[in-house]
Amino acid sequence: MTGGIILWGAISLRALRVHWALQELGLPYACRPIQSRSGETLTAEFTRRNPKQKIPCLQDGDFTLTESPAIVNYLFNAHGAGTDVFLPGTAEEQARSDEWSYFAMMELDAHCLYLIRRHKFLSEIYGEAPVAVASAAEYCRKQIDAVAPAVALADPYLFGDRIGAADILLSSTFAFAQRYEVALPEPCQAYMERALARPAYQAAKARNEDLNA
Ligand SMILES: N[C@@H](CCC(=O)N[C@@H](CS)C(=O)NCC(=O)O)C(=O)O
């Protein structure tokens, strides 16, 4: 492997997840603070790294990876041993972590929140779709309500004392929901606030907003 860790992406909720994982793991990294819809994801140099022309994109030596949940899980698995984070130790724990992660990414992020973002908050680019937005918000609320009793058992995180990759994905997606006006039930709000109060999240937020990184 050559080089260190480089994260491409800033001012982005999905890049923030990766900054957060890097901060939890205490890994030194460089940031290339390119932003979505700025033209910076469309350059030939970046397109060679990520043909999807999206952030975040991670380089770890000569290994390049896209998709925020894959990157967060990769960082925990590749660099988490010997640190204070939670790593699944059994097939059942891995499956439970995957279940939370896919729920956050598919049921909430992809099905609902990205649709709301595009067609309500970025409607000047993607067009208005009020019926789809209202339906996505209702569906999102229903899905979050359904998991609220399980989230209420998080003490303080999904797998106990130590924060895991699934916590980063779920709590960051709850924050995404709140930002897009989907109300959180109390246990989800409290869980999200605990996670976002972590110093690593605060450091990640500052890095994600630093365009001079
Ligand atoms: N599924 C991808 C989604 C990545 C994504 O959509 N990123 C947005 C920013 S949050 C982006 O790069 N958009 C590029 C653009 O629209 O120019 C992930 O989770 O990493």
Image (spheres, rainbow, N blue to C red):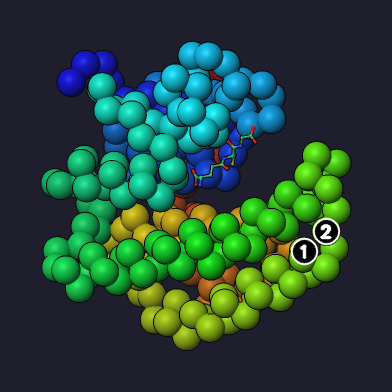
Percent x, y for residue 167?
Answer: 40, 61
Res 26 quadrant in image = top left
**Residue in the picture at 28% in, 61% down:** 162
Q: Is residue 7 left or right of residue 163?
A: right
The quadrant where ligand 1 appears is top right
Specify few, some or many for label 2: CA neighbours under 10 Å numbering under 14, 14-19, or 20 or more: some
Q: Are marks 1 and 2 in contact (CB under 8 Å)?
A: yes
The span from disc 1 to disc 2 (Cα, nearest Å) is 6 Å
- Assign a secondary structure to mark 2: loop
**Residue in the picture at 78% in, 44% down:** 126
Percent x, y for residue 12?
Answer: 59, 39
Q: Amino acid at mark 1?
A: Val
Front in this rendered view, residue 47 or 89: 47
Res 65 quadrant in image = top left
Residue pointed to by mark 2: 129
Is residue 73 something one can see in this rendering? yes
Q: Is residue 28 left or right of residue 213?
A: left
Is residue 179 something one can see in this rendering? no
Does ligand 1 reach within 8 Å of label 1's beta carbon?
no
Res 175 quadrant in image = bottom right
Q: Amino acid at mark 2?
A: Ala
**Residue in the picture at 21% in, 57% down:** 87
